[in-house]
Image: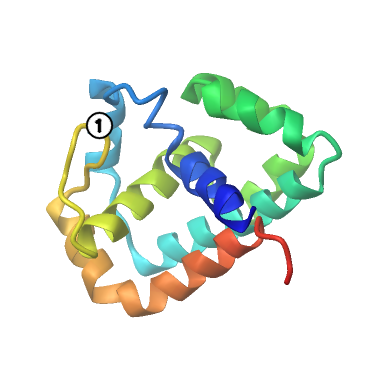
Amino acid sequence: MRRAILAVVLACALAPLVHAQMPMSDEARKQILAYQLTLPRANQLIAAMAALSKQMVTAPDFKERMPKLMKMSNAERKAEIEKDPKSVAILKENKLTSDEYLVGVPALRMAMMMAQGMPASANVVASSANVAFAKANLAELQPKMEAAEGVLLPKK
């Protein structure tokens, strides 16, 4: 069960760009490659991800919503975020827009994946600057990312 939930968490983090195993769009690729990571921005993204994940898990319709979220386009996800006052407040608290979040989280995750040796592919891209950033900050970012993902994992 724990692995299944972790797989869902990972899929959600990449879902905005890894849609139904199809190569990401040219626009999504451009957005990710143009996104510039900094340590403050990475920390904002991770904090927002943890808070939004916690909110999602506590929703009574979590199990029903998850498959729907996985199939949504970025525009649909953006609309979902923006119609939920709690989600908007979380992003605002972390000084992020929905667009920054929907591009930034996958950009951060992919940069970290590539910093750990995963090769680029149709669905995994990062700018060389973001990969270098992730390598330089991996020891600090990895535990934070794991803690944020842990929000969705059941307590032992």
Is the C terminus in the top left, top right, bottom left or bottom right quadrant?
bottom right
Residue that label 1 marks: 29
Q: Amino acid at mark 1?
A: Arg
**Residue 70: percent from left, percent from top:** 55, 29
Does residue 33 appear left or right of residue 22 in this picture? left
Nearer to the camera, 81 or 69: 69
**Residue 24: percent from left, percent from top:** 29, 26
Q: How many marks?
A: 1
Q: Secondary structure at mark 1?
A: helix
Does residue 130 appear left or right of residue 109 in this picture? left
Viewer can see residue 106: yes
**Residue 101: percent from left, percent from top:** 49, 44
**Residue 114: percent from left, percent from top:** 22, 56
Residue at 41% across, 25% down:
19
Q: How is the image coloured?
A: rainbow
Residue at 53% across, 22% down:
71
